[in-house]
Amino acid sequence: MAGRITFTIIKPGAVQNEHIGPILGKIAEAGFHIAGMKMVQLSRNEAQNFYCIHEDKPFFGELVEFMVSGPIVVALLEKDNAVEDFRKLIGSTDPKKAEPGTIRHMFAQSIQANAVHGSDSDENAIKESEYFFAGYEKFYKDKGGCLQGSMQ
Ligand code: UDP
Ligand code: MG
């Protein structure tokens, strides 16, 4: 069964251009509960670790520089089928290929500055949310028999 959590980042660029409110509006409209949220400034080391899966890609260095270029908003989102539904809501990595109405189509500036991150699997959703949120920062709507603060 698909998991109920996913993790997102509103990236620099979208924060800089005052898109936090409109992006959160789209997320709420799509039926996601915000179970955790904060604004943070990543260090280079933190950005490298978050995107370590891409460390061999040619865009890695520039991606890290972009991710530390200003504050970001990180959020833990809760909904049935969260990972897949959120990936649909944000659209393709390259905003030129993103469907009209998707968050990236509406708010991305480029393939790098593409407004938002969305986890690509249940396993990564848990890993990524644990990278940014302690148990006492998580407020799930559906505790569903799980320990408060953990959806595992
Ligand atoms: N990215 C980039 N250039 C590329 C591909 C990706 O700068 O050619 C950046 C972009 O910000 C993207 C992130 O690297 O969101 C992670 O890439 P991934 O392929 O995982 O895309 P996503 O899962 O974010 O859609
Ligand atoms: Mg990805």
Image (cartoon, grey):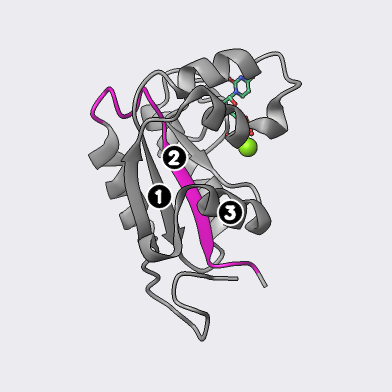
Ligand 2 falls in which quarter?
top right
| Screen quadrant of the N terminus | bottom right
Q: In this rendering, is residue 24 above or below 135?
A: above
Give the amino acid at mark 1.
Ala
Marks 1 and 2 sit apart, C-alpha to C-alpha, by 6 Å
Q: Nearer the viewer, residue 42 or 25?
A: 42
Looking at the picture, does residue 51 appear above or below residue 90?
above
In the image, the segment drawn in magenta is 2-18
Q: Position of residue 77 (x, y in %)?
A: 43, 58
Task: Give the amino acid at mark 3.
Answer: Ala
The residue drawn where x is 50% and y is 38% is 117
| Residue 57 forms part of the magenta stretch | no
To which residue does mark 1 refer?
75
Quarter residue 78 falls in: bottom left
Residue lying at 32% horizontally and 46% vertically, measured from the top left: 38
Tag 2 residue: 9
Question: How far is the residue under mark 3 from the one under mark 2?
Answer: 12 Å
